[in-house]
Amino acid sequence: MDITVPALGESVTEATVAKWMKKVGDAVAKDEPLCELETDKVTLEVNAPAAGTLAEIRAEEGANVEIGQVLGVIAEGAAAAAVAAAPKPAAAPKPAAPKPAAAPAQTAAPAGTAAPLSPAVRKLVAENKLEPAAIPATGRDGRLTKGDVLAFMEKPAPARTGMTQRVPAAAPQPAPAPEPAAPPRVPGEREQRVRMTRLRKRIAERLKAAQNTAAMLTTFNEVDMSAILRLREQFRDSFEKKHGVRLGFMSFFVKACIQALKEIPAVNGEIDGDDLIYKNHYDIGVAVGTEQGLVVPVLRDADQMGFAEIEKKIGELGRKARDGKLTIEDLTGGTFTISNGGVYGSLMSTPILNPPQSGILGMHKTQPRPVAVDGKVEIRPMMYLALSYDHRIIDGREAVTFLVRVKECIEDPQRLLLEM
């Protein structure tokens, strides 16, 4: 039975064989994972369609495969044992392929050829008032090429025939040949060359596309985390006992962002050609760093979730991301993204947009700092916030107002309950 590449998700048609978990001759159970495929969005497992023995691997690790392509073959039932036990016959030597006859050297066709002209050649001939029959042709089947015409025009005037009138305008010059690509650098003695994964390539393409396409700008603010820390300390144990999940920072920021998005809808929108699309749903992407790269699973309809549900869903998506179990549905359709570089110790950064979204909030490390409070200097737990946004759809006033609303909700969490 053939092992084939399954459907990979919307707009995904190709994958790379990342790893085989079985080798030829191994017994396999039905639905047992056989290999991993890596797409530009997720990594997925291909399971055995039947029990038996892995008789053949047709797509080795690192091979690019398409939907429906055969990855390998499973020998089922009794035949499986026979296949596993039987030695492989020696491959018969392939007969030497006959050498193809050398193609005759292409020579210029004599002047006077009557082969039809291509549109480009016809235009060039007409503009320069040339007689096609007088120009030697070197194309296939005696056709006249653009290069033939240009070469003919470069000849000194006495050597030309077939021109009814000398044209003083300079003839168009052929485009220069592209420079050959530089050979790949040879790794040094203490270096290692590793092929970029499909996911990493896709991340690089999307981030660069965001920089090249959007009019990206970042605005900053800082937030006093005292109220959130007191609230978490007060209700930490009872919240975890009731809901079975810890109360983290992220649920507060998701709620605060949704409140700000409702007030500033442009930050939740996107540009589509000459149109602006404003979205009345709030699917919040939460960036997660994994060994394979950064992924952004999405909290669907986060505005309809409570704090506990948000924390549970973030934990579930984080585990799926680290285990490589995210699906295409988990990663598509977000309207706004939150990235928490503070978990790695980042104090300040400028996050890059996650296209086609128009805004992304960057959270950072909470750090005690001296701040002025009611005319006095106090040490408060402070966090820098950064909002990167597409200036084509979001004005500076809207971006600053959005960030101020997030700050107000975090510094006074009662606003989240009252939706203010």
Image: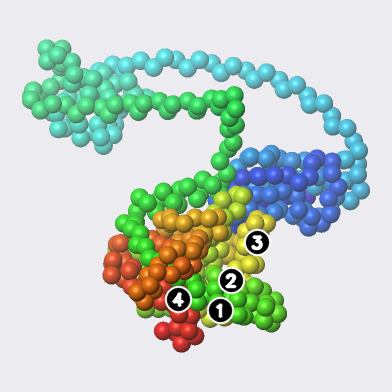
Q: Secondary structure at mark 2?
A: loop
Camera-nearest residue between 100 and 61: 61
Disc 1, SS: helix
Q: Residue at x 26, y 22 (%)?
A: 148
Pick whichever of labels 4 and 3 is earlier in the sequence: 3
What's under tag 4, amino acid-wise?
Glu
Residue 177: numbered disc: none
Indicate which disc, 4 or 2, sits on the residue closer to the N terminus: 2
In the image, is residue 412 above or below residue 341? below
Labels 1 and 4 touching (C-beta < 8 A): no
Residue 407 occupies which quadrant of the picture?
Answer: bottom left
Expressed as whole percent of the image width and height from the top left, the position of residue 416 reads 47, 82
| Nearer to us in this view, 354 or 122 | 354
Crowd rating for badge 2 (residues with CA inside 10 Å; few <14, some 14–19, many 20+): some
Above or below: residue 14 compared with residue 218: above
Residue located at (58% from left, 44% from top) = 197
Circle 3 packing at 10 Å, graded few (<14), some (14-19), many (20+), is some
Q: CA distance from mark 4 to mark 3?
A: 32 Å
What residue lies at 56% left-to-right and 51% top-to-bottom?
293
Nearer to us of marks 4 and 2 is: 4
Q: Earlier in the sequence, mark 3 or mark 2?
A: 2
Query: In 3D space, how far apart are the residues under numbered discs 1 and 3 (Cα atoms)?
Result: 29 Å
Specify the amino acid type for callout 1: Leu
Reading the chain from its start, which is encountered first: label 1 or label 4?
A: 1
Query: Could you tell me residue 275's position as x and y percent?
Result: 31, 67
Q: Where residue 320 is drawn, which disc sits there? A: 3
Near-viewer residue (27 or 211): 211
